[in-house]
Structure formats: structure tokens, C-alpha cells
Amino acid sequence: MTSRGTSMPLTYEGPRMRYVGLAAIPCILRRAREVVRRFRTPEALLRSTLLGLCVTQLAGCIAAYPRDGVPTKHMATAEVNGFPGDIRAWGDSYASVPADRLVLFRNERLEAAKTDPSIKPRELNVLTLSGGGSSGAFGAGILAGWTKAGTRPKFDIVTGISTGSLIAPFAFLGPAYDDQLKQSFATIKDANIYTKHSILGVLSSASFTSNAPLAKMLDEYITQDMLDQIARESGKGRRLFIGTTNLDADRAVIWDMGAIAASNRSDRLKLFKQVILASTSIPGIFPPVELEVTAAGKTYHEMHVDGGTSNEVFLMPAGLSLRELDQTFHARVKARLYIIRNGRTTPEPSIVKATLPDIAEKAVSSLIKTQGIGDLYRLYAVAKRDGINYSYIDIPTDFTVEAKSPFDSKFMRALYEKGYEMGRDGVPWKTVPPGFSK
């Protein structure tokens, strides 16, 4: 610590941040402790980010650590070092998908159908999995119960956001991975996902917690063998997409995980797991993932966070329509869209305490829910435009177990079982968005 005159009475140089102003410290610590104590659910973690703004305001002079972000003029052309450019696309781009990629998709499916009867070139079963934190146990249960019922289709396209990105690789590879899905969502607890930072850790990093335990869990479940299987299935004209948000560019990014798996690069496993970790990194709660990219001959780093920051669910790149596939296949493709919303779409009334944290928590909860409902309407519009059969399911109102912590094992087991029962007994799919009547 050094004295730097009246304008900067006290300065502490940390590894990534600079703190100035002794008088602010007690208030900063008090506010930070409030934030940590209030962590109850994943949504509460996100809502508490608002309190992080209070912390930075109180500090007044916290300076961000230096970054080598991609200059804005080069963001559109940046590529992940060593990987082909087609492993990802802007999620909000309406530019047409290159014709050669559509032809490749068609040819892969036609060729695979000769030896694999489960591949039907004129049919597409699409599964899209939303975010929802610990509520991902619902989607895991739905899939396992659906397998038990004997009616679960083989999905040709699987997409995932946030907690949905954790489910997506297992769902893509099919029922053989149901047991691992159950282990991932029905047997874990908070300590398997995150650890709380110390007060100085909160102030000297870009997040309130560390997701190192989650990264360790990914190391256990996401293996080279799994990537080999995903690469083989991708070669049959099946696709696995995961969404992140490029925070620098302020845009959604869709990653072709099959293309990453099929790249045969020695670092494919690292990038595969980085993308999943980024998709689950709630801004301010978990640290962002910085991906090394190249643009204009120079190396930079992109900051990627939770895909739910942009969309709660997505179908495919915005510029791709089923009409284009019809033209490419020279035949009508029959498509079915199944959306698993790992959350609720109905009101959750409660008496809100007249405190800043409680008001902020409730307001952000409503905002997230409204965004999710809006995404369901967006996909419904796409489905109607392209003649896709639309179905979605969300957590029902008769599930009343409450989470006592962000990843409460009792809550997750109960929600998994609820989803399993619904899947086993026949998923009560809804064919129009919430509140919509034909």
C-alpha cells in the first residue's frame, strides 16, 4: 500500500484490480457480504449481480484489468486460432447460410441413410434446451422418462443454452447417456458447481464466485471418446449447436460443436469445454471465458458469457429457413420442434419485502421469465413460417418444491423425478406459446 496524496489517499494494487479510498472499504465489505448471504437460487445469483453494481459504485475507483479485446472493426472476421471459420456463426445474422454447407448437410444425410435407418433425409426432429440453472434437472428428467416411454425420437438437431448446453451433448448422443445425465443433475450440490470468492476475491475478479468445480465436472464427463462419437454423428448430417454471448460484440454466437469435434485438432477438447463453460457463465456470477482468436493477423481475446444473455432458446442460425432445406433436398422436409423450457412461464406471486435486494431479485426474475416467453413466441413465428410442428413444455405449476440454495440437491432430485414422470407418462406438449390462442 502506498500513499499518493489527497486525491488518492490509499491504493492497493491487486493482481487484476486497483482499489482506492480507505473510507469506502467498510461499506464495500458490508455490501459484498450481503450479496454472498443472499445467494439462494441460480436466479438469485443473477439478480444479486445488481448489487455488484452497488459494490463498484461504492468503490468508485475500481479499475478493470487490461484486456486485448478484438477491435470493433475486426469483430466480424475474427476466428478461433487454428480452427476453420465455419465452427461458429452470429446467432442474430440473417445472412443466408452458404449453399455449399447446405449441400454438405444434404449429402451427409443421404449417404448416412444408406446404412443407418434412423437417419431419414426428409424428416428433421429438433430439440432445443433452454437455460435455467438447477432447473436443468427438469429437462434431464423429461429426456430419461421419454426414453422409458419408448417414444423418444432420435434428434437430428440439438441446441442448448446455459444449463441446456450441459444437457445438449448427452441428448444428442441419445438414451445411452441418460444415466450420466441423471448423475449430472440429480446427484450434485452447490460444491460441485461453484465456490464463493472471498471479499477480496470478489473485488479482484470479474465474478462473485468461481466455477472451477463445474470445469472439473466437465473434465470428467466431456471426454475424447464423447467427442469422437459426436464427430461421427455430425458426419451423418446431424448437428449439435450451443449458444454463447460475445459480450464485446454484444451478439449471440452459435457454435457447431460437431465441427469442433470433427476438427481432429489436439486442442478440440479444450475448446469444446470452453464453449460449454462460457454458455453457462452467468455474467458477474461466474467468470467470463476469454477465447483466443485471430483477426487481421493479430491475436486477441473475445469475452464470452452465458448464452441466455442473448436468448433463452434458439433453433438454428437466423439466416437458415426450412424453405432453403426443401430447395436443397428437392423435396418437402417434415420437421418437428421440441422445446424444453427449464423454468416456468406462469406467474409466481409472492409478497416482496421493501428492500433493494428483494425488489431487484423479483424484478429481474420477472424480466428473465418474460424474455423466455418472448423466445417461445419467436420460435413459434419461425415454426409457422417454415411449416414446422411446434411443441414446448415447461415446469408445471403443481411442482411446489423450493430450492434452498443455488444447486440444492433435494430440489434437483425432486424436479428430475417430476420431469421423469412427465416423460414416462407422455409429455403433455403445448402447441402454442403461453397465453396464445389460435
Image (cartoon, rainbow, N blue to C red):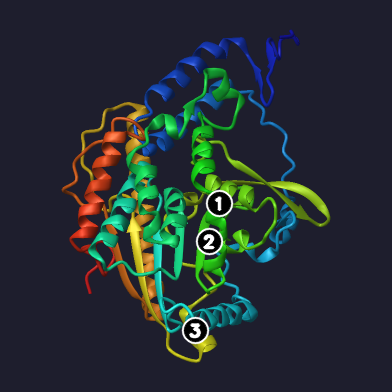
Q: Measuring 37% from the left and 81% from the top, which residue is drawn there?
A: 387
Contact check, label 2 and label 3, Cβ < 8 Å: no
Q: Which residue does the numbered mark 2 point to in the structure image?
A: 229
Secondary structure at badge 3 equals: loop
Q: Residues within 10 Å of mark 3 (few under 14, many from 20)?
A: few
Q: Which residue does the numbered mark 1 point to in the structure image?
A: 245
Residue 73, x across and y down, in percent = 74, 57
Amino acid at dot 1:
Thr
Residue 224, x across and y down, in percent = 58, 52
State whether residue 240 is above or below residue 135. below
Report the side of 337 relative to 233 (left or right): left
**In what quadrant of the picture does the C terminus appear?**
bottom left
Task: Decide if residue 281 is in sight here.
Answer: no
Alpha carbon of mark 2 to alpha carbon of mark 3: how far? 19 Å
Amino acid at dot 2:
Gln
Q: Earlier in the sequence, mark 2 or mark 1?
A: 2
Q: Using the image as rendered, state which of residue 13 and residue 355 is in the foreground.
A: 13
Q: Which residue does the numbered mark 3 point to in the structure image?
A: 114
